[in-house]
């Protein structure tokens, strides 16, 4: 019974232990409760030290490296370009390191240490079970395909993934190391499976990398080489069984059925397609824009970065949108060949773009709506700065409709010469996601949970019908019917009456998840590519990998100007904006890599200090494990703590998890508890 731990101890000790248990329970689900569970015991223990002369904090051998780290933080703050912010984060580092000492002070015997760990592990398991439920709903809503990440019910998904990797590694350590009853081992197996599913569902590659590294560390320390066989098999299956492929399919309708008439296999990744007469232009990602005729390549247009979209602008001018946000203007010459004329960008961070009645509209999250009016003169443009935050839009010469997720609203504007001038109506969709299509006076809206039809009459939006249809990516219009394609490849059709449009009904399923769906004449085209998520970790063309390479390159530019002590432990957003390549739109407050980020904020001097600190922590974990490796439970914990720390270091190759409060709190907690177990073991050994 838990009450035995509260029997025979002072009231103040009961309060401290209760708060630390609250701290352990909330490590994976609530930073607010977690802070209460940590700071109150720290304040009480500090009060006992200063006022009552009752020092419960013990040295652990890491004092020197902690002092050196804080000194490096302090020096970089003094030389920082933003001293106020740097000193603020210095204080944050300062008050979190005592997590190590607080845990050791409270877990002053092995029974209390076990209790604290079990509270953490039990709460973490329940949290992951809840996360899997949220992930299932996320999957059903097809948000994995839209957002390319898992849900965030408790923390931001990168943080959730990192925390789950710690828990998974601990369960694996106990599964491998503990010699106990079969029922207990089955529980560890079940819990490890839950943790692995939760980690996979987070869709965070950095956390995956950390989880795999931690498991491999356990295998190495335990020399359980046979375990590597199924792990390697799983990795090989994940890497090679789910092969990458890319195709553009052609369909016609015969007897109310979609019939495939052609399939073009592409070397790159077919993402978008347009049809111009007998020529298909395919945005083929890393292979640029490729022109096909009769199923054969007639021209490859190289692009300076992977291309994600291709659209016709006007006459013989086309645009290719690149993964690094540059826009390539293509010109079709008289001989039918395409030539790249120039590149340009929109003013801000682009969220959506479309060609409407000969004008190129670009919605930027931070700088409004920009309309390029003439491909021959890119300076001929108009920017509506107040129309920011738009996620999707459509329009014609007299009407413009937009969706803004911040306020969930559809907004209708009247147009003059195709330019939106006056807001005339709006509708609250109660959705944070949406796509819109306008066809004559009919408006279609795909929200997070429903597909809604509106009519526009007398400058008013009127909701007509709603369907439980999720994940529509594109509509294709003709005179008699409207076809809809969903993220999971369902094709639906609605009949057009003179005044209304009927309910969309499924007519077929493609059997794959298309990236694009268009109608050209009596033919339909879909673009499809499948990429292995695990292989994307080392894929140089993956969008987030390109993004990270740009971030790191910018980071090294900053380091060149601040080599010794860095720029200070600050948010790097403003500084990043000054050093990044001009065509890069998004600013980043951190480098998405522990080691690059530490170089930038602390310089080479501070970086060397932190590397020394991390080395000494790893060395201590290994020392503890080797000392207690024959002790039941304690050795399993030490094994898991060592492996989890290694996983944390590897996750840091793709994320700034050292600067994530929840993650670094977990690092200090697991270190402190490992030291607490070790000290209890030494005391018990001396007693014996």
Image (cartoon, rainbow, N blue to C red):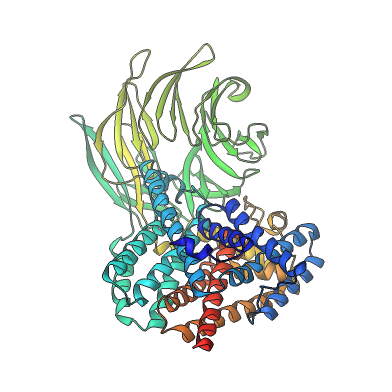
Residue shown at 39% from the left, 51% from the top: 132
Q: Quick check: can you spot residue 192?
A: yes
- Please indicate whether residue 180 sits to the left or right of residue 152 in the image: left
In-front residue for pair 631/462: 631
Q: Nearer the viewer, residue 464 or 57?
A: 57
Please tell me whether residue 506 is drawn above or below residue 147 in the rendered image.
above
Please tell me how many numbered marks the rendered image carries. 0
Q: Residue 383: x percent and y percent?
A: 66, 34
Left or right of residue 647, residue 607 in this image: right
| Quarter of the rendering containing residue 48 | bottom right
- Location of residue 129 with respect to 254 vertically, above or below: below
Residue most extreme to the left: 255
Which percent across, then down, holds residue 295? 30, 49
Residue closest to the eye, 85 or 480:
85
Query: Is 274 above or below relative to 212?
Result: above
Residue 645 in the image: x percent, y percent? 52, 72
Picture coordinates of residue 13 (x, y %)?
61, 64
Q: Residue furthest top?
A: 458
- The quadrant holding residue 506 is top left
Q: Where's the N terminus, which quadrant?
A: bottom left
Residue 231 or residue 317, whichever sits in front: 231
Can see residue 538?
A: no
């Amino acid at each position: 019974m838990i009450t035995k731990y509260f029997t025979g101890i002072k009231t103040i000790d009961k309060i401290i232990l209760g708060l630390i248990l609250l701290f352990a329970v909330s490590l994976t689900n609530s930073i607010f409760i977690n802070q209460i569970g940590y700071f109150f015991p720290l304040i009480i223990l500090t009060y006992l030290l200063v006022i009552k002369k009752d020092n419960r904090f013990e040295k652990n051998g890491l004092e020197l490296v902690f002092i050196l780290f804080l000194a490096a933080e302090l020096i970089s703050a003094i030389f920082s370009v933003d001293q106020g912010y740097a000193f603020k984060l210095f204080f944050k580092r300062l008050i979190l390191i005592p997590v190590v000492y607080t845990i050791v002070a409270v877990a002053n015997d092995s029974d209390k240490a076990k209790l604290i760990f079990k509270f953490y592990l039990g709460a973490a398991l329940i949290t992951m079970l809840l996360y899997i439920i949220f992930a299932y709903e996320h999957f059903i809503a097809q948000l994995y395909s839209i957002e390319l990440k898992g849900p965030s019910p408790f923390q931001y998904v990168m943080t959730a993934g990192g925390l789950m990797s710690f828990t998974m590694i601990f369960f694996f350590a106990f599964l491998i190391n503990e010699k106990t009853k079969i029922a207990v081992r089955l529980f560890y197996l079940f819990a490890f499976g839950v943790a692995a599913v939760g980690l996979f569902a987070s869709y965070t590659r950095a956390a995956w990398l950390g989880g795999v590294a931690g498991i491999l560390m356990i295998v190495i320390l335990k020399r359980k080489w046979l375990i590597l066989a199924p792990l390697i098999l799983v990795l090989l299956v994940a890497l090679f069984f789910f092969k990458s492929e890319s195709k553009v399919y052609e369909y016609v309708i015969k007897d109310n059925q979609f019939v495939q008439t052609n399939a073009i296999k592409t070397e790159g990744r077919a993402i978008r397609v347009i049809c111009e007469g007998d020529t298909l232009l395919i945005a083929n990602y890393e292979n640029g824009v490729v022109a096909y005729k009769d199923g054969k390549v007639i021209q490859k247009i190289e692009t300076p970065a992977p291309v994600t979209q291709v659209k016709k602008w006007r006459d013989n001018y086309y645009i290719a949108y690149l993964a690094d946000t540059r826009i390539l203007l293509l010109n079709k010459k008289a001989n039918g060949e395409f030539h790249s004329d120039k590149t340009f960008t929109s003013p801000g961070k682009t969220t959506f773009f479309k060609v409407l009645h000969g004008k190129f509209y670009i919605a930027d999250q931070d700088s409004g709506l920009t309309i390029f009016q003439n491909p021959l003169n890119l300076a001929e443009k108009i920017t509506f700065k107040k129309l920011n935050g738009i996620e999707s839009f459509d329009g014609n010469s007299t009407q413009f409709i937009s969706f803004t997720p911040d306020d969930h609203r559809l907004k209708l504007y009247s147009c003059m010469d195709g330019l939106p001038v006056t807001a005339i109506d709006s509708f609250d969709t109660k959705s944070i996601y949406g796509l819109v299509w306008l066809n004559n006076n009919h408006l279609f809206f795909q929200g997070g949970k429903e597909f809604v039809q509106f009519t526009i009459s007398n400058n008013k939006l009127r909701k007509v019908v709603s369907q439980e249809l999720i994940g529509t990516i594109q509509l294709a219009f003709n005179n008699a019917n409207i076809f809809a394609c969903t993220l999971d490849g369902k094709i639906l059709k609605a009949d057009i009456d003179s005044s209304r449009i009927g309910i969309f009904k499924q007519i077929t399923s493609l059997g794959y998840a298309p990236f694009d769906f268009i109608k050209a004449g009596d033919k339909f085209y879909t673009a499809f590519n499948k990429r292995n998520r695990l292989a994307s970790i080392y894929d140089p063309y993956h969008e987030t990998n390109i993004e990270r390479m740009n971030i790191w390159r910018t980071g090294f530019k900053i380091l060149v100007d601040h080599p010794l002590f860095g720029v200070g432990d600050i948010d790097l957003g403003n500084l990043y904006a000054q050093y990044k390549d001009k065509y890069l739109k998004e600013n980043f407050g951190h480098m998405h890599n522990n080691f690059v980020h530490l170089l930038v904020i602390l310089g080479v001097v501070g970086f060397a200090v932190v590397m020394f600190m991390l080395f000494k922590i790893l060395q201590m974990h290994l020392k503890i494990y080797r000392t207690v490796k024959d002790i039941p439970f304690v050795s399993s914990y030490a094994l898991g703590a060592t492996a989890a720390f290694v996983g944390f270091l590897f996750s840091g190759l793709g994320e700034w998890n050292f600067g994530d409060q929840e993650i670094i709190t977990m690092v200090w907690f697991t270190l402190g508890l490992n030291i607490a177990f070790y000290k209890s073991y030494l005391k018990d050994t001396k007693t014996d």
